[in-house]
């Protein structure tokens, strides 16, 4: 991969990283905690005036004000630019040059195209479909899917990078991206047959179709194994009929009036009283008995990611749409939830990073008692603690990501 990424679109970069087991462990040389030599940050971290003075905050003792005041202070423009926006190939955040270029590409896209539209679409509770499909043009919708089915064949660290950068600009768009790229695409890529992957993944990776996953129910959220949706064999075992309701489904609708294009749906095929005994099915838009119950509106946040109730009324699904073995879906579920939870954490890190940037900028712009807020020790402490916690979260996130093999079964 070239040292300098070409202009967008840049899908070839996202086809450069394979299984993390093939990536050698990075040395401490170039580590962002050992050196503050990093790539240039995006423009929103570079206000025209100096930002608050903050110390180098990696030791835990730096949380104490006395310790903070005992170290040499640096402008936050230096700290935030070189630490918040670290981009050194060989660091835990970018183990390879391909990872560093992926982050650079996604960050430019997020700043130039995602950030400017976020407030309008969230205010109106609309999903920006053209922008979502741009992610397909960049090779991001099938980030972890095999290349032979239109994906980019990348690893868990790459998925974290994309989710962190997108959520820093628009968490709602990123949530819809997560539901599509991980809950549908990655799930099918790890658990589906070659025939199913050949049928559904190319369209999902390009953005032609938008998918999601149906697991939660009105009375089964966290306790997902108590779900009531059932799939009964019919036609001598040649098909199944799904009956039940799924709730809070991201991408359940993308226009407010119809369902999304395709979903992976969990339903019980074992005895009703048995916890578990679930199977996984591919259900397409327009399937008999499959309908949109309602779009869930007026959410507390992430309103540009549309959420819906989906209804299955003896929904007929052919046996070839059964993913994995009958009664085997708990394994599929746990296998995919591992990376989903990881990337939800990456989204949180992106939101936290943007929040620290906003704190630093405001403490510079707002004055009190004739001084900028950045001049007061209490404000420095609050910004410094937030910065240190954000950095600790990112370090933990990427340490876990480096240990995950997307092709392994859950233990």
Image: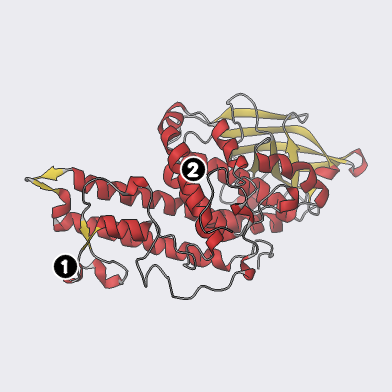
Question: In the visual, does 311 lie left or right of 363?
Answer: right
Find the distance from the CA under tag 1 to the CA under tag 2. 38 Å
Residue that badge 1 annotates: 69
Within-10-Å neighbours for mark 1: few <14, some 14–19, many 20+: some
Residue 410 occupies which quadrant of the picture? bottom right
Q: Residue at x 53, y 59 (%)?
A: 99
**Image colouring:** secondary structure
Vertical position of residue 56 compared to residue 278: above or below: below
Residue that badge 2 annotates: 109
Q: Residue at x 57, y 46 (%)?
A: 178
Q: Residue at x 75, y 42 (%)?
A: 200
Residue 53 appears at what percent x and percent y? 20, 58
Question: In the visual, does 186 lie left or right of 34?
Answer: right
Question: In the visual, does 78 lie left or right of 179?
Answer: left
Q: Nearer the viewer, residue 162 or 228?
A: 162
Residue 373 appears at what percent x and percent y? 16, 49
Residue 376 occupies which quadrant of the picture? bottom left
Upstream in the sequence, badge 1 or badge 2?
A: 1
Does any portion of residue 404 appear in the rendered image? yes
| Disc 1 to disc 2: CB gap under 8 Å | no
Q: Residue at x 60, y 33 (%)?
A: 309
SS class, disc 2: helix
Q: Residue furthest left?
A: 369
Vertical position of residue 232 compared to residue 164: above or below: above
State the quadrant of the N terminus: bottom right
State the quadrant of the C terminus: bottom right
Residue 195 appears at what percent x and percent y? 83, 48
């Amino acid at each position: 991969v070239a040292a300098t990424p070409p202009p967008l679109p840049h899908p070839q970069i996202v086809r450069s990283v394979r299984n993390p087991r093939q990536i050698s462990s990075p040395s401490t040389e170039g580590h962002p905690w050992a050196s503050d030599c990093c790539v240039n940050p995006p423009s929103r971290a570079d206000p025209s005036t100096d930002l608050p003075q903050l110390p180098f905050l990696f030791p835990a003792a730096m949380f104490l004000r006395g310790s903070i005041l005992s170290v040499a202070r640096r402008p936050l423009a230096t700290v935030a630019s070189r630490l918040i926006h670290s981009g050194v190939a060989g660091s835990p955040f970018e183990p390879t040059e391909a990872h560093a270029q992926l982050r650079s590409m996604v960050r430019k896209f997020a700043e130039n195209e995602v950030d400017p539209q976020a407030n309008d679409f969230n205010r109106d509770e609309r999903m920006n479909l053209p922008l979502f499909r741009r992610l397909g043009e960049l090779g991001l919708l099938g980030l972890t899917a095999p290349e032979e089915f239109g994906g980019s064949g990348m690893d868990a660290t790459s998925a974290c990078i994309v989710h962190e950068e997108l959520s820093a600009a628009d968490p709602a768009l990123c949530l819809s991206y997560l539901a599509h790229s991980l809950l549908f695409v990655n799930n099918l890529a790890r658990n589906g047959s070659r025939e199913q992957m050949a049928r559904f993944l190319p369209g999902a990776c390009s953005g032609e179709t938008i998918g999601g996953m149906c697991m939660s129910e009105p009375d089964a959220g966290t306790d997902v194994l108590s779900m009531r949706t059932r799939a009964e064999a019919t036609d001598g075992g040649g098909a199944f009929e799904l009956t039940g309701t799924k709730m809070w489904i991201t991408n359940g609708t993308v226009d407010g009036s119809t369902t999304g294009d395709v979903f992976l749906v969990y339903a019980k095929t074992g005895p009703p009283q048995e916890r578990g005994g679930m199977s996984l099915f591919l259900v397409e838009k327009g399937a008999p008995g499959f309908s949109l119950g309602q779009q869930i509106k007026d959410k507390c946040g992430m309103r540009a990611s549309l959420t819906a109730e989906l209804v299955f009324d003896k929904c007929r699904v052919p046996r070839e749409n059964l993913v994995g073995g009958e009664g085997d879906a708990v394994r599929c579920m746990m296998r995919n939830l591992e990376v989903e939870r990881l990337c939800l954490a990456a989204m949180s890190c992106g939101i936290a990073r943007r929040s620290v940037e906003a704190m630093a900028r405001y403490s510079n712009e707002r004055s009190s008692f004739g001084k900028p807020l950045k001049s007061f020790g209490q404000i420095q402490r609050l910004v410094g603690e937030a910065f240190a916690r954000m950095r600790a979260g990112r370090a933990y996130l990427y340490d876990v990501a480096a240990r995950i093999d997307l092709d392994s079964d859950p233990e």
